[in-house]
């Protein structure tokens, strides 16, 4: 099944922390969606993707993570968005997503270790059962004017 992953509609912080986690650590069956070193970061299995845009500036930002069906942790199969625009990525891995079914979603902390607390505001979290298009992500971020892809 395709999923867009967590679409954290808006966050505001000056710190790092876990926004959304689900799955379990054994076997790398966990997806982590957080702010690390001021940038968005998602982790799964043995890899991670990082954004290039600082989001821990105390301003509201829309962040989205889109995962295509059968995806691994590499662009374009997994894409990070900041404020409706695809954000650059520093690293990735070939691990296919293999999330543990039936495990609770945790918001504002890493549930598997009960740490990485999120200090700030999270306005809304949405998890979709399909991958969103770039236009749909832009619309959720509130972009109403046309824009060129960077």
Image (cartoon, rainbow, N blue to C red):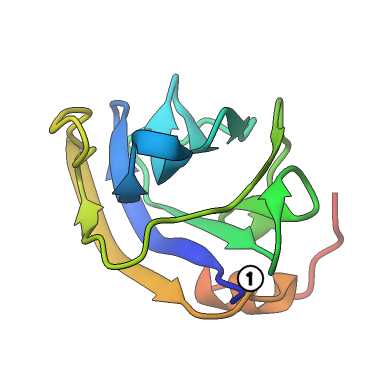
- Image coordinates of residue 69 in percent, x first then y, are 69, 69
Residue 56 seen in the current view: no
Instruction: Decide if residue 83 is on the left or right side of residue 87.
Output: left
Q: Which residue is mark 1?
A: 138
The N terminus sits in image quarter: bottom right
Which of the two residues, 135 or 2, is positioned nearer the viewer here? Answer: 2
Count every numbered label the image shows and give the total.
1
Say what secondary structure mark 1 lies in.
helix
- Above or below: residue 129 compared with residue 50: below
- Image coordinates of residue 11 in percent, x first then y, are 33, 51
Residue 85 seen in the current view: yes
Which of the two residues, 37 or 58, is positioned nearer the viewer here? Answer: 37
- Above or below: residue 36 compared with residue 109: above
Picture quarter containing residue 18? top left
Extreme-top residue of the structure? 37
Classify 10 Å Cα crowding around label 1: few (below 14), some (14-19), many (20 and above): many
């Amino acid at each position: 099944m395709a999923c867009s992953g967590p679409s954290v509609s808006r966050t505001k912080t000056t710190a790092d922390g876990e926004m959304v986690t689900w799955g379990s650590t054994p076997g790398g069956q966990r997806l982590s969606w957080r702010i690390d070193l001021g940038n968005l970061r998602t982790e799964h299995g043995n890899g991670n993707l990082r954004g290039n845009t600082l989001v821990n500036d105390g301003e509201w930002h829309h962040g989205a993570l889109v995962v295509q069906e059968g995806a691994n942790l590499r662009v374009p199969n997994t894409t990070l968005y900041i404020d409706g625009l695809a954000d650059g990525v520093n690293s990735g891995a070939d691990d296919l997503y293999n999330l543990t079914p039936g495990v609770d979603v945790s918001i504002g902390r890493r549930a598997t270790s009960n740490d990485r607390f999120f200090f700030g505001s999270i306005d809304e979290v949405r998890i979709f059962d399909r991958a969103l298009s770039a236009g749909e992500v832009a619309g959720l971020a509130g972009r109403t004017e046309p824009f060129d892809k960077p």
